[in-house]
Image (cartoon, rainbow, N blue to C red):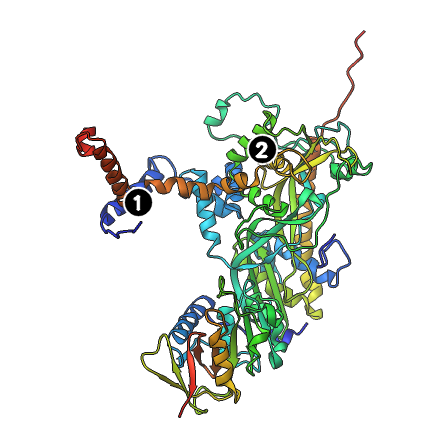
Amino acid sequence: MNTAAPSLTDEHPNRARAEWMGLLARARPAELAALLEKAQGLPGYVLLRGPETGLVMLRGRAGGGGAPFNLGEMTATRASVRDAEGRIGHATVAGRDEAHALVAARLDAALQDPARHGALKATILEPLAHSEEQRRAALARRAAATRVDFFALTTQR
Amino acid sequence: MADHILAHPGFADPVHDAQSSFRALLQALARPGTLHAVAAPPDPPAPLSPATAAVLLTLVDSDAPVHLAGPFALLAPWVAFHTGSGEAAADGAAFVLADALPEFAALPTGSDEIPEASATVILQVPALKGGPPLILRGPGIETMQEFAPLGLPGDFVARWAANRRLYPRGIDLVLCAGDRIAGLPRSTTVTEWR
Amino acid sequence: MAYVAVKGGERAIDAAHAWLAAERRGDTAVPELETAQIREQLGRAVDRVMAEGSLYDPDLAALAIKQAQGDLIEAGFLLRALRTTLPRFGVSLPIETETMRLARRISAIFKDLPGGQVLGPTYDYTHRLLDFSLAANGTQATAPEAEARDEAAPRVPDILGREGLLEADGASAAEPFDLTRAPLTFPASRDARLQGLARGDEGFLLGLGYSTQRGYGNNHPFVGELRVGEVDVEIVPPELGFSVCIGTVELTECQMVNQFAGSKTQPAQFTRGYGLAFGHAERRAMAMALVDRALRAEELGEARTAPAQDAEFVLSTCDNVEATGFVEHLKLPHYVDFQSELETIRRLRGNTGKPATSLPEAAG
């Protein structure tokens, strides 16, 4: 790594929060909305910024591990809220779904509340992590089915 | 994290408020010394006046970094949050936010080939009227324009004359007080009222 | 040359656009395409439009393809136009392709490599026979699954690099060049070249890459590794000050390994060309890697003799939005330009003593 900013793969100053923010960002919006229906209501909120759609420049590395270069942009949508209890929540999610960004920001605020955290973790974060794990496992199983097993042909005499 | 400062929202309607404020800025710079209202955000963080906040939110972005001088340094998280601008040193800034006129020599003044690569100073003053009267002449002014802001230094006329001599290089000035702004582009000549 | 503004044609233009909309819809007895169908069933077209439009958003690319009636260059143009209207929130941390969740990963230089040869969904080994069963809708297809082995798939350069046989990646702490913010100048640095190639026209890159194999700047390429899969995108929002994942993207990466005889200062070793592309785009990633390697000729002390080795030629010509703009603008009225040329020709003919008939009549 030769970037100044810490990555999730390094020592992270706020790992727990970064992990739930990532989980919320990668969630399928429909699944997140359905889980939210089952959770107890979130506190009221005011918008501090957004939801608004913009761009993030994606960077790669020359040779895969070398100096960074700009590969191209992607769409992203962000929102920031302050909830009725004064907690500030942020979200940036890939794509253009404003409702997704707003829900993720509200959840980010609510998850900082120790009184709510446990219940939200059980009703939202854990199911999201489970379905993400299933998607990844399905990809790995499909890939495994196309893995080549070489075998030597019988030597011809 | 200075989260409390982020509790102050930006523009109520980011696209339209920025467009109308930009329009007001164009008018202010095209008609030096005249006062224009801007679409101010509802509750800007201290010590920003509503007009100063509107100008910042309209002009500053990640490609046009701002230097926050004096008491405005505390606003860095709010400015980064709403504009995407990181903190710039005075000599590398596209915009300088100050409540006292900075030394122009410390700011980028552009080059003869790229005169627009100069800094624009956003100066927050107590009022745009009621100060010592100045006479403005130049492009955008038919004969002369009176302008009497409070909060300019005593040697302003001499310092502005030095800036005027750099033309086409030089600093442009946007003055803000309350919910009003006025422009002083580098093409304007300033003299004292006699 | 002065321009003379003329007005007229609004009615004709409106009618032309209305006809275009009707032609786009086609026979209304046939169901209208949904953009979700394009995204799901024409994924390779979506990937190409995202790469050349330089904007990763499969839904928008699908919409652009629908709007452009499948004209992929026009669709890329639509994405480029859209991106100019959006603010930039920031830049990602460099993507670590080593952490890719692989759908496909092959190497043409090592048969047995850790993590194995994983074919993924590939057209390789198909017989290129038209499948008429697809013409009758209702196809059901299921991907087979097998027990996934918990085995790391290190990047092939890391395997070869351990022995010092392959040049290292190199590193730089400098902020990379961004051609969407600053004009390209020459000689262009490798970061600028890679950005230009990543959004270049696939056909043009393919032709250039092929030209190196045909002997115009050959450098003996091997596919060290080709990998396709999903990676996480992380940014550091200023309000947080730490990195968060905002989503995932699918990418294709190609490591091309090339012969290099060595020089006075360097022992013989393999060099590399690099390709990285949005989506599943193997041809693009491979062609990009071939051209990237060709453009490194000077840096590696090779004679620069072929078009693919000329950065100014390659990068100034590979952008199909710029190219189509300049070629297609020739359709627009050039009445005044042409009038002046006509007068010149008439004057020249007049000077030869031949009768100065007007050209249109002479042509008639």
> Helix, strand, or loop for circle 2?
helix
Q: CA distance from mark 2 to mark 1?
A: 35 Å
Q: Amino acid at mark 2?
A: Arg
Q: Which residue is mark 1?
A: C17
Q: Quadrant of residue C174?
A: bottom right
Q: Which residue is mark 2?
A: C283
What number is the disc on residue C152? none
Q: Amino acid at mark 1?
A: His
Give the mark, 2 or 1, whose residue is nearer the N terminus.
1
Front residue of B61 and A15: B61
B138 w.r.t. C351: above or below: below
Q: Whole-percent x and y of residue B97? A: 55, 76
Instruction: Please report, as a chain letter, where disc 1 is located.
Output: C
Instruction: Please report, as a chain letter, where disc 2 is located.
Output: C
Dot in front, 2 or 1 = 2
Q: Is residue C302 shown left or right of residue C364?
A: right
Q: Whole-percent x and y of residue B78? A: 59, 72
Front residue of C329 and C202: C329
Q: Whole-percent x and y of residue A96? A: 52, 55
Q: Whole-percent x and y of residue C364? A: 18, 28
Mark 1: give few (<14), some (14-19) or many (20+) Cα within 10 Å.
few
Q: Which residue is found at the position 75% from the left and 42% from the top?
A: C168
Please say whether residue C353 is visible from this viewpoint: yes
Q: Which residue is found at the position 63% from the left and 52% from the top?
A: C176
Is the residue under label 1 in contact with that under label 2 (CB below 8 Å)? Answer: no
B138 w.r.t. C290: above or below: below
Front residue of B81 and C302: C302
Please say whether residue C34 is visible from this viewpoint: no
Mark 2: give few (<14), some (14-19) or many (20+) Cα within 10 Å.
some
Front residue of C247 and B110: B110
Q: Is residue B71 shown left or right of residue B190?
A: right
